[in-house]
Image (cartoon, helix red, strand yellow):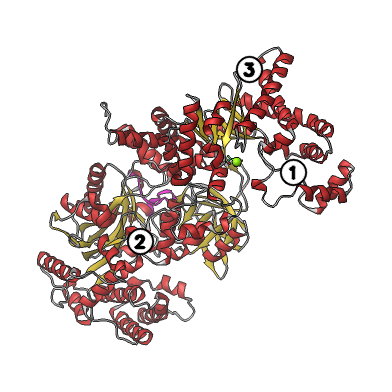
Amino acid sequence: MARSIYFFGAGQADGDAQQKDLLGGKGAGLAEMTRLGIPVPPGFTITTEVCNAYYAAGKALPAGVEGEIDAAIGRLESLLDARFGSADAPLLVSVRSGARASMPGMMDTILNLGMNDEIAAGLARRTGSERFALDAYRRFILTYSDIVLGVPRDRFEEALGLARRDAAARLGVDATRLNSAELERKVPDSLLDPGSLAALIQRQKEIVLGATGNPFPDDPRAQLGGAIRAVFDSWNNHRAQVYRKMHDIPHAWGTACNVQAMVFGNLGDDSGTGVAFTRDPSTGERRFYGEWLPNAQGEDVVAGVRTPHPLSRSGSGGGATSGGGDDADDASSLEARMPEAYAQLAAVQARLEQHFRDMQDLEFTIQRGELFLLQCRTGKRTGRAAVRIAVEMAREGLISQREAILRVDPGSIDQLLHPSIDEGAPKRLLARGLPASPGAATGQVVFSADEAERRAGQGKAVILVRSETSPEDIHGMKAARGVLTARGGMTSHAAVVARGMGKSCVAGCSAISVSQGQMAVTIYDDHGHATGSITVKAGDLITLDGGTGRVYLGAVPTVPAALSGEFEELMGWADAVRRLRVRSNADTPHDARTARNFGAEGIGLCRTEHMFFDEERIHAMREMILADGEAGRRRALAKLLPFQRGDFLGVFREMAGLPVTIRLLDPPLHEFLPQDEAQLEQLSKAVGVSAKELRRKSQELAEYNPMLGHRGCRLAITSPEIYEMQARAILEAACEVAAAGIEVEPEIMIPLSMTRRELAITRALVEGVAEQVFAEKGRRVDVRFGTMIELPRAAIVAGELAEEAEFFSFGTNDLTQTTLGISRDDAGRFLGAYVEAGIFAKDPFQSLDVPGVGALVELARDRGRAARPGLKLGICGEHGGDPSSIGFFERAGLDYVSCSPFRVPVARLAAAQAALTAESARGPRATD
Ligand code: PEP
Ligand code: MG
């Protein structure tokens, strides 16, 4: 291992922005800002390699690191003319985690470290504020005890309550009838006087002694060692692990640890702290945006205990929009309260955005009028904001169009495509909060993360309602459709995490109060006067509009997403660079239209079996299945023919001029038979066959392993008349559409083939029907014949199959199932453990198993194209909408991917990114 520690301070830094892997995002940002001459309190970063070595050695710091830490502390002391552990000129530090990818609130941070009784007294002398010094000290003991010593925060609640009551007595406030929340409102932290704080510190220390059997550590060096270890340990806490899994962050990255001289935002009314974004992280609008709290430390803003104020006056943009930027907001803005610090911050943010050429998320503290930056990183944003920022930055010339394409995570644009509240629908407004994360969500109210997870597990849509969320709630947020909080701002935990997840979130909704399993809502009129109240209980339905911050009682109808001009523009740029075509899996004219509206360039898979489940059709289908001989089957199929033809007519019209691949019947027939007794009785009456006979037939069709049974083209080998009817329906519809002057491109696809002979038989069947239909209609249409590749044998003998097939479409759902020998219907029960254990990086049914299934795709490609040059290759399994799998399909040189309609834009963007990535792997273009 090279060096363990990278120092930054006084305009110089050992590291820079390129070293995120080693220094984490925070460490790299601090180093870069220092180099740029931006005011940053000095400090040092202990690398992620040290973290990994710490774990490799069974949680022990590698030899030599402690010496390097001492030396770095020495450098800090001489730079600041202060001493760590001295009461005369105390140096206090913060110890913060910071991984390569941001994991907001998941790992630990300790502030005000390096304190004991004497140092606190020294700090009081030095700052002239005993209250401030004791407040910093009691906060430090609380956090350190919780994080390092394992004495949970809530053990100290009662002591804090007593301190508030002490202070209340001194202030002459009658606290006898106040509950703890009311007491906190009447006596906030800022009103705790030195006497009550000193008594609180004493009580806190007693609690620590009682809980651990040891006194609270007085030695700042021991405190520092403990905090660094705790930060490394927090990389592996439960919530960090859950977060990493959700965001595909490898466990092997480790976190860096930043030790930095403290600056204080709680030194009085000329101090403060806040967070800022160089553009609006929710909408992407170009405006300096953020929140701050006067006389506070950073954790106060993020914890959401006090609702922060906007940075800018409403006229100049920015800030929380609760109440729509009114006069009170303006007066409390940083711009109004500290114009000089605001102007300096505005200049710094503009410079940082230009320097990093991306939207930045900043943390700052103002200590007695002096501005310091504590963090700068690429800001998290909603999908909507990502698109707008990328497009506008390209228009501004800050980045190229190609960079803009690569900037937007294809998965995140999913959010843009989701419905919003139907403004015209009747609805009952309950309350308003901050529009923290866009999208409409309806669900049953739940008040705990565990309950959210439990009910969601039962298939219920739930909205998680909390006073505020903390990282412990992450599993509940994941399970919920939306999140509503009573407290906290746009940068509170709830807001940041929900935006990252693409979930609807309304935060800081002060009209609600949550306690004892219910939510009390104060109703206000348009003038802000309270007019009544409503109680909402667990299980009641509410609807959130994360785009406006409104909360409605009951379920409110929604309307489909309206895509922005920037979105269309980005998609246009993406379409211009991508090579892969994007089709959609669509079974109905309605889905076909949706897909086409999203930019689908054809249908890659029309699953005909879905067409048989309608009330009238299922009868004919069942009749066909139950018929004893071919003649009976043909009679029933004749009833189905007009329905099928009608379906295809609709689909062909919607997809005029584009190819439509229709797959002939695939599932085993017993899937169409009644699943329960009541339905069986009903069917028995309808078809005049006894229930007993029906049961016998159903048992006869039942299979041990239906996925590997009598399905796919195997059905046509035993009962060719089914495929004959379908081929006729397709071709009659095609002729009819063509006769109406609409261009039609049918492709008939055979599922689950494994031998050339199966294809030869089904092809002869289709061609026979085609000749008949063309003769009857007096016109011909071009129709292509092809097959799915869903079995390893099919991939292996692809050369032979290509002799019969004009195209292949990889059915990677079945191909994954049959290659891995893992049932796609049962995999859910144990695949999670496989991913957990690192056997698969991701669920192979979601993200293609490239070394296994991918190798078969390549084999089939090579053998197929060798036998039939120009053989068209597509993929229509679920992987067709998965961005990382799309990267593979691009590299593999397939012609198109096909995915569900709502994934089409995702696939278009992912295909463009894959093309750009492949291009840059081949070397720069002359024009770039
Ligand atoms: C597949 O197997 O990948 C496929 C698209 O077909 P289905 O999911 O209908 O089996
Ligand atoms: Mg299949």
- Between disc 3 and disc 2, the foreground one is 3
Q: Which residue is mark 3?
A: 781
In the picture, residue 201 is in which quadrant?
bottom left
**Image position, residue 839 (x, y; %):** 45, 57
Looking at the image, residue 781 sits to the left or right of residue 880; the answer is: right
Q: Position of residue 334 (x, y in %)?
A: 29, 54
Q: Quadrant of the N terminus?
A: bottom left
Query: Which mark sits nearer the N-terminus, 1 or 2?
Result: 2
Nearest the eye: 619 or 448:
619
What SS does tag 3 mark?
loop
Mark 1 and mark 2: Cα distance apart in space: 58 Å
321 magenta-colored: yes
Give the mark nearer the N terminus: 3 vs 1: 1
Q: Which residue is mark 2?
A: 301
Considering depth in this image, is 581 or 335 the residue closer to the camera? 581
- Mark 1 or 2: in front is 1
Q: Is residue 747 above or below residue 306?
A: above
In the image, residue 208 sits, relative to residue 45, either above or below, namely: below
Element type at mark 1: helix
Q: Which residue is mark 1?
A: 672
Q: Which residues fall within the magenta stretch? A: 316-328
Q: Is mark 3 within 8 Å of ligand 1?
A: no
Alpha carbon separation for disc pair 3 and 1: 32 Å
Residue 512 is inside the magenta segment = no
Closer to us: 165 or 717: 717
Q: Establish if 615 lies above or below 478.
A: above
Q: Amino acid at mark 1?
A: Phe
